[in-house]
Amino acid sequence: MLYSCMREKKNWHYGRQLACLLVMLWGMFICLPGTQADARSRGMHELTYFETSEVKVDGREATRVEIGMDRGNLDYEVSVSDGEPNVLQILMQKTRVGEVRQDIKVHSHEVKGVQFQQSGRRDLVARVLTQHEKLTEGDYQVQVLPAERKTRLPYRLAIDIFHGQVQPEQPQVAGVAGHTIVLDPGHGGSDSGAVGPDGITEASITLPVARDVRDILQASGAKVVMTRDADVDVYGPNASDHDELQARVDVGVNTPGTDIFVSIHCNAFSNPAAHGMETYYYPKTDADYRLAELLNEELAVAGGRFNRGVKEARFYVMRHSAMPASLVELAFVTNPEEEDLLASADYQQKLAMAIARGIARFFGAA
Ligand SMILES: [Zn+2]
């Protein structure tokens, strides 16, 4: 009896030790960072952060693109795009784009833009559009940057594009040298203009397009004056519609030798199905129609959207500018498909080139 009692006690003691051991093992299991990371990596990475900067790496200057995400342990592959030797592609496994824009225009030394494209069901491709004509291995490097608690920076992929020897060639048009052109990016400041279903504003499209047109024309020898070159009201705060429009007209009036005035807008309509491009004129000189017609022809070819034609209208900036003037409606920001196009850096550049070509043809024909 005594013996068996002791055995029972001993068994109970072993049972308690086993329980302690199990608790300890379980504790070790949940505390092991590797194990936790492994468990997490089974989920999807979601992009939460995007930034570009100019950096110096090992004495070489580079444009750095940082793509941040909500968790670490990213598996990725880097390659130069087959058909586009200026595009660096990073295939990010088990990643979705999250709150980061899918098509980001970048104004930096070496990078023009970054696009994110879904690849299959689970992977994401970051396409870094560089200024290099042809990327070779020494032109870039990709590394992982850990999350920083102090600065609250997330786990990031840092893509460095090293400055090349050759400067990119700015596209040009022939026949505009010596001419003076006023470009009017519609809206801005207190007036965002029309807003698309994804929240893209007209003012945020008209400015980069106008800047691209300006860069092309200036590189081609023209003098270009913008009514605005930032997200501002041209007149200033609290202007009436009339004051604001007259302030834009005044830029043309006050710029000596202004040859033409081109106002850039996006269309809007209550029905999201409305779509297409159109250009406007007011027949105050012999050349107003011609300018609108040439812009229309070039935008139709480059933009590839439905052409609503060349239309007469009494818009203030066209009527009150002394020189030939046209107002272009690039597409409908209220149409989901056209909103996506209008927000894309590539499409903006295409439309800008079309406007520059139309202007070049106008001077060629004049
Ligand atoms: Zn507008």
Image: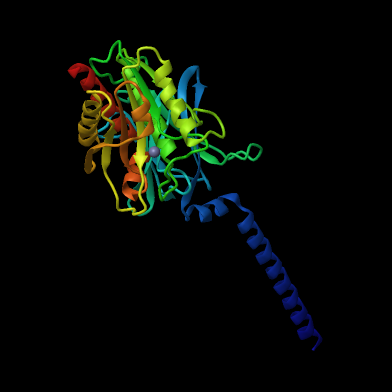
Vertical side of 91 occupied by 248: above or below: above
The one of 97 and 311 positioned closer to us in this rendering: 311
Regarding ligand 1, which quadrant of the image does it lie in?
top left
Whole-percent x, y for residue 69 in the image: 51, 44
Q: Is residue 46 left or right of residue 86?
A: right
Instruction: Using the rendered image of the protein, determine whether residue 137 is visible from the camera's viewpoint.
Output: no
Q: Nearer the viewer, residue 277 or 167?
A: 277
**Residue at the image position 33 percent from the left and 33 percent from the top:** 348
Residue lying farthest to the bottom in this orientation: 1
- From this view, report whether residue 172 is shown above or below residue 327: above
User: As rendered, which of 47 and 336 lies closer to the eye?
Assistant: 336
Location of the N terminus by quadrant is bottom right
Q: Residue furthest left?
A: 365
x, y percent for residue 185:
40, 30
Q: Name the one closer to the observer, 14 or 309.
A: 309
Q: Position of residue 110 (x, y in %)?
A: 40, 24
Question: Which of the 4 image quarters holds residue 75?
Answer: top left
Residue 105 seen anywhere in this rendered image of the structure: yes
Q: Quadrant of the C terminus?
A: top left
* Residue at the spot 53% in from the left edge and 47% down from the top edge: 70
Would you identify the image quadrant in which residue 289 lies? top left
Q: Position of residue 347 (x, y in %)?
A: 31, 36
Instruction: Identify the residue at the far top of this view.
Output: 178
Farthest residue, direction front: 284
The reply, left or right, for residue 332 in relation to residue 17 is left
Please determine whether, in this image, residue 219 is positioned above or below residue 142: above
